[in-house]
Image (cartoon, rainbow, N blue to C red):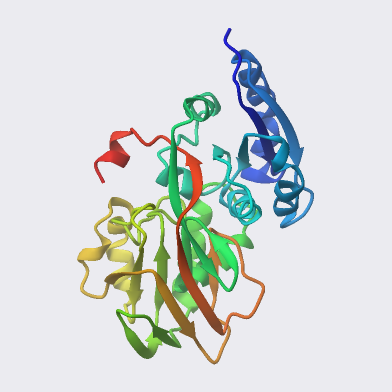
Amino acid sequence: MTKSKYKYLLIVNPAGGSGRTMKALPEIEATFRKHGMKYEFHFTQEPMHAVDLVKELADDFDVVVAVGGDGTINEIINGMPEFDKPFGLIPIGTGNDFSRSCCIPYDSVEKAIDIIRTHDIKKLDLGEVNGRRFINVLGMGFEGQANAIGRKLDFIKGTIKYILAIAWALIFYKRMRMKIECDEKNIDDDIYLVSVGNGWNVGGGLQLTPKARMEDHVFDVCLVKDISRWRVLSNFVRLTNGTIDTLEEIEIFQTDHLKITSTKPIPLHLDGEQLDDDRTSLEIKLIPDAQQVIGNWNDPKYLNR
């Protein structure tokens, strides 16, 4: 057995995957030991605790690994700015959207660890909104409202939670006035949805920005001013197969910064997490080549995008 030269900091969200994270720990530990990988587990105790754990511990490790879902990943990313270290994933969440964008299996701990062992690194862009970083997507309007509803359905597991959240938002969400400013657009109108994609998956594999790439130094922005409930429902399959951009109601453009304002707080999420600060004035910018990420970059699904 050849021992790994790297030391891994494994940050674990005990609540990740509706409790599946803790059940997976024995397999994770056995696989790391089998491959002679040096590691330590550290556990989050409350929201945003992963940020503090990274800042406190990362100096003593070569690679930081998220054991959990998109929320754990988002917290770790926000603890990493002062560390030039690679970031790896063992995805055990509900949506696992960032792992999909990195082509990392979310149904096999051993395969995810095999990808970490390859140490195949890309420098990915990050997004930032009002000083808080995100790596996959920032969703506003209908998408933000659906996410907020989904967070209240923690007692429901799997994709069905996202479907119920979307259905509930379809019934009750109303368009809101937003002013959107960037080099490419200047809009002051009632808006249904704005999705700022660094990656291309959201809500458990739905694709609002199907052509987004995480290293091209621009966001793909999906803008919907108005769309009927029937059009959403009758074209839902397009969200899963990457063809939603063929609908006339969908506008997609690229930019590296946005300013969005509203007289009312905008429903939003970043990587599935809530932003608790001011949501009436949002400064969104792209930070190029900001984070080393270990991914399955030779997967045909990634190469052929």
Image vertical order of residue 15 relative to residue 39, above or below: below
Q: Is residue 169 left or right of residue 64?
A: left
The one nearer the camera, 277 or 154, is 277
Give the quarter of the image for residue 247: bottom left
Q: How many marks?
A: 0
In the rendered image, residue 158, in percent from the top left (x then y), is placed at 53, 47
Q: Position of residue 133 (x, y in %)?
A: 56, 62
- The residue drawn where x is 58% and y is 83% is 265
Q: Is residue 149 at least partly visible in the picture?
A: no
Q: Is residue 301 above or below residue 5?
A: below
Residue 15 at x, y percent in the picture = 70, 46
Q: 133 or 143: which is nearer to us?
A: 133
Tell me if 29 is positioned left or right of 226 in this view.
right
Q: Residue at x 68, y 31 (%)?
A: 23
In the image, residue 278 lies at what x, y percent?
Answer: 63, 80
Quick one: quadrant of the N terminus? top right
Foreground residue among 42 and 155:
42
Q: Is residue 232 visible?
A: yes
Q: Residue at x 46, y 73 (%)?
A: 142
Specify the farthest residue to the top: 1
With respect to residue 211, does 178 lie above or below? below
